[in-house]
Amino acid sequence: MGLESHLGDNIMTTTLNTMVNWARKSSLWPMPFGLACCAIEMMAAVAPRYDLARFGAEVFRFSPRQSDLMIVAGTLTYKMASVARRIYDQMPEPKWVIAMGACAISGGVFNTYSVVQGLDQVMPVDVYLPGCPPRPEALIHAIMEIQKKIEKESVLNTK
């Protein structure tokens, strides 16, 4: 005997947070930032075998102003760190970041003066995806984790 009984079959009621978060999580626009071998696995994830389109993230955008998810895949050097940060800053809010691979997470096997020992030193990271390189299924799981995070956000609150 609520409001739904008076509205009919073609109308549903929901909260603004639920509706906006559903739209955001169902239409992620990832921007690949492929730096090493992890980028090959990232490309495989959008191929027909793994079908990333099932999760609403099928079209990679190569413009930061059209993206809301940045996937940093591979070894980040100090020369590329400023470029990565500049691209991250150009993305509109809300935005999310996946650190893909051991090299992006912690520098991996490259413990040298020229490699950033963790992407989180350059920008905030939402999901860490371990592996060398991680399989496409793992990237799909990371995107699903981002979607779970988006579901819990509030429209009025920003990062």
Image: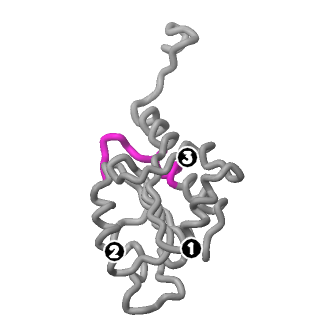
Judge from the rendering whether residue 27 lies leftward or rightward of residue 115; answer left or right: right
Judged left or right of residue 55, residue 75 is: left
Crowding near pointer 1: few (<14 within 10 Å), some, many (20+)?
A: some
Q: Nearer the viewer, residue 150 or 42?
A: 42
In the structure shown, which secondary structural element does the residue marked by tag 1 occupy?
A: loop
Which residue occupies 44% across, 55% down? 31
Q: Give the amino acid type for the residue marked by disc 3 in the picture.
A: Glu
**Badge 2: residue crowd in 10 Å (few <14, some 14–19, many ≥20):** some
Residue 27 x %, y % = 49, 41
The part of the chain drawn in magenta is 146-159
- What residue is shown at x 61% (from left), y 65% (from top)? 41
As drawn, 58 above or below 77: above
Identified at 55% across, 46% down, the residue is: 58
Q: If the image is split into quadrants, where does the C terminus sit?
A: bottom left
Residue 37: assigned label: 1
Of pointers 3 and 2, the one earlier in the residue sequence:
3
In this view, the mark in front (2 or 1): 1
Nearer the observer, 148 or 108: 108
